[in-house]
Image (cartoon, rainbow, N blue to C red):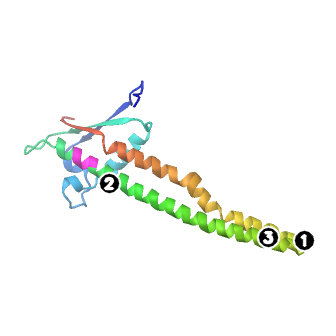
């Protein structure tokens, strides 16, 4: 495997919080490693990370005003943040898989429907060339191709934003997390 001449860029984010609990959703009763991030913290981290190229690596430094006296929270926070974004990556991957399945089913239905419409347009064409048959033939052709819009939308446009989100969440699930004391 050939190594790139340019290493992946590293981008740094500094989060400043009073206490560890500020990073997590206060309504979530699960232990920290399985807890959801606070929605505001999650949006902040995601929007910051989304601004960088897909080959970027992330370093997140969490500045706590005062470290808890019982233990160093670095390992717990690293695991919690990694677990949170790994879960979001897997959930978004499932949404993408479901969308692509819907696209394949829609494509099959669309192909059958457009084929039937085009066959019906050919049958109508055999009745002669007058205004009524021309309108019916053209209408069936248009309706048949309009039925192909949804599968084409899925395969041309809808999948790649989800794929980009999966990649972002994967990168965030492996971000280097550092916890330091101080403002």
Callout 3 environment at 10 Å: few (<14), some (14 to 19), or many (20+)?
many
Residue 44 in view: no
Q: Residue furthest left?
A: 70
Q: Main secondary structure of the magenta part?
A: helix
- How far across and down, in percent of the image, does residue 154 sit? 56, 57
Looking at the image, residue 18 sits to the left or right of residue 69; the answer is right
Q: Secondary structure at mark 3?
A: helix
Residue occupying image coordinates x 18% and y 43%:
75
Q: Residue furthest front?
A: 1
Quadrant for the N terminus in the image: top left
Quadrant of the rendered structure where residue 34 is?
bottom left
Quadrant of the rendered structure where residue 133 is?
bottom right
- The residue wearing badge 1 is 131
Q: Are marks 1 and 3 in contact (CB under 8 Å)?
A: no
CA gap, disc 2 and disc 3: 50 Å
Residue occupying image coordinates x 41% and y 49%:
166
Please tell me whether residue 30 belongs to the stretch shown in magenta: no
Looking at the image, residue 1 sits to the left or right of residue 147; the answer is left
- How far across and down, in percent of the image, does residue 99 sit? 49, 60
Range shown magenta? 78-82
Q: Are marks 2 and 1 in contact (CB under 8 Å)?
A: no
Q: Residue furthest top?
A: 5
Q: Which mark is in front, 2 or 3?
A: 3
Q: Secondary structure at mark 2?
A: helix
**Upstream in sequence: badge 2 or badge 1:** 2
Q: Which mark is residue 87?
A: 2
CA gap, disc 1 and disc 3: 14 Å
- How far across and down, in percent of the image, does residue 125 sit? 85, 71
Callout 2 environment at 10 Å: few (<14), some (14 to 19), or many (20+)?
some
Callout 1 environment at 10 Å: few (<14), some (14 to 19), or many (20+)?
few
- The residue wearing badge 3 is 121
Q: Nearer the viewer, residue 138 or 10?
A: 138
């Amino acid at each position: 495997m050939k190594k790139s001449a340019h290493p992946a860029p590293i981008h740094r984010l500094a989060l400043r919080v009073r206490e560890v609990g500020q990073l997590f959703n206060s309504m979530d009763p699960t232990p920290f490693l399985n807890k959801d991030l606070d929605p505001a913290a999650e949006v902040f981290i995601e929007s910051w990370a989304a601004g960088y190229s897909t080959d970027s690596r992330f370093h997140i430094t969490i500045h706590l005003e005062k470290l808890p006296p019982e233990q160093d929270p670095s390992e717990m926070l690293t695991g919690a943040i990694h677990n949170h974004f790994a879960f979001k990556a897997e959930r978004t991957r499932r949404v993408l898989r479901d969308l692509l399945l819907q696209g394949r089913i829609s494509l099959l239905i669309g192909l059958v429907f457009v084929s039937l419409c085009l066959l019906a347009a050919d049958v109508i064409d055999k009745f002669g060339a007058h205004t009524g048959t021309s309108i019916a033939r053209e209408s069936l052709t248009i309706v048949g191709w309009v039925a192909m819009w949804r599968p084409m939308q899925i395969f041309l446009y809808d999948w790649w934003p989800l794929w980009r989100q999966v990649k972002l969440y994967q990168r965030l699930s492996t971000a280097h997390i550092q916890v330091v004391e101080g403002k």
